[in-house]
Amino acid sequence: MTYQNYSLKQLQQIDAAHHLHPFTDHKELREAGSRIITRAEGPYIYDSEGNEILDGMAGLWCVNVGYGRNELAEAAYRQMKELPYYNSFFKCSTPTPVLLAKRLAELAPKSVNQVFFGSSGSEANDTALRLVRHYWALEGKPEKNRIISRRNAYHGSTVAGTSLGGMEPMHKQLGGAVPNIVHVMMPYAYELALPGESDHEFGLRAAKAVEDAIVEAGPEKVAAFIGEPIMGAGGVKIPPMSYWPEVERICRKYDVLLMLDEVITGYGRTGEWFAAQSFGIEPDTITTAKALTSGYQPLSALLVGDRIARTLVEKGGEFYHGYTYAGHPVACAVALANLDIIEREGLVDRVKNDTGPYFAQALRERIADHRLVGEVRSFGLMGAIEIVRDKATRERFEGEGRAAVVVRDHAIASGLMLRATGDTMILSPPLIWTRETIDLACDRIVKALDLAEKDLFG
């Protein structure tokens, strides 16, 4: 029996009876009932009632090539027919992860040439944490194991991912984080810049928080700094261009490894294959997932720099770490086909030179002046809209996040899927969006803001 044999109410009842959703208030969800998404095509998703919704979040930051790509389904089908699965243990491999690792090394910054596969960004960050601490132990410095991260960072929801991240509600539910992880200020100028402080100056001050944490702990105890090039789930917080080069300089000065979490920013979203290239830095590890397959298969790839890889190979012996589905042949076949699409259709260059600049212009010209909007910002095809009660003072509405949820719900009802994070609306659309799609999205955002204004001010 297929889902078409069930009514929406029946599916919602079954969902409530058996399905625990991620990041969800289950009592609230079961009272309202889930929206059931049944199909998708291009930049649109469709629910069980036939409503067409423009997807402003690329699924969950991942569907970069859009929906309905037959060649990705065909790549999975061909690989399933030939070899549906074999593992990478026991000194074995299969062709697709071998070829994908080579392809990723060719796309990554020049000093990054090794790849460790998993199934999710959370797994990849677990691996990165393990690998970095193992590296320093192999170098005879096991006490060099502290990781510096940032407040409100998101690095996944496993125990290690939650610990690396800086979201306090997640820490409280964890009930005991991985030790020796500390969090410093985020580069969020809208709320943290001082009066009269330029973006350049703020970027340097935010970077200095990393240096202060290194000095406080003692460089001999600090293994690495980890950060998202642009903080995603925390609200698309875009650092000034002065920030990342200064962080890299600080890390090199104190011999601290630089770990980038590019689970969201990787594979074209910033107008380069990796945001490391957008910000002009060379990290020691790059965590990737999501858009690696455009969400068509679960797959992650931790890209490992030559310094770490050389020590792992020459001094490491067996690395006691790995996953059943690491380098899954079907997922890797889909990833190869997905990268072909991104490259063939010039989606990275399109974001850099066309849709990214147009997206920024559209947000400024059509959204920024609205009464509810304190700031708009974007980088490539990532955008944020700060929701405020008072534009001049930046006063928020009472009840953190309440106003943004009102805007979000009106946007979805108006045919645009976007996300509310705290008091910030965030967008991360498929890279196939055109100028026309951006205009349509702005129409629907304006409508949602107008309706929310009536609700919030009466």
Image (tube, grey):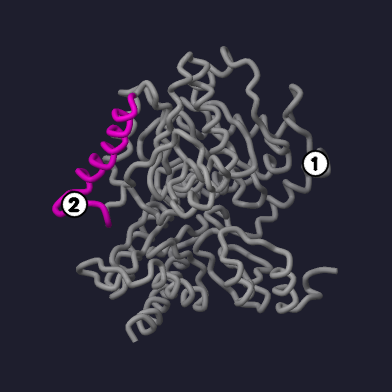
So how many labels did they put on this image?
A: 2
Give the farthest residue toward the front.
Answer: 175
Which mark is in front, 2 or 1? 2
Q: Is residue 448 above or below residue 23?
A: below
Q: Quadrant of residue 219?
A: top left
Q: Is residue 118 above or below residue 434?
A: above
**Which of pointers 2 and 1 lies earlier in the amino acid sequence?**
1
**Mark sitting on residue 361:** none
What is the magenta segment's predominant secondary structure?
Answer: helix
Can you identify the residue that label 2 sits on? Answer: 194
Q: Secondary structure at mark 2?
A: loop
**Is residue 196 on the magenta stretch?**
yes
**Mark sitting on residue 84:** 1
Residue 451 in the image: x percent, y percent?
Answer: 40, 82
Q: Secondary structure at mark 1?
A: loop
Q: Residue at x 28, y 66 (%)?
A: 374
Residue 370 in the image: x percent, y percent?
Answer: 30, 74
* Range covered by the magenta-colored residues: 191-218
| Gap between marks 2 and 1 measured at Cα | 56 Å
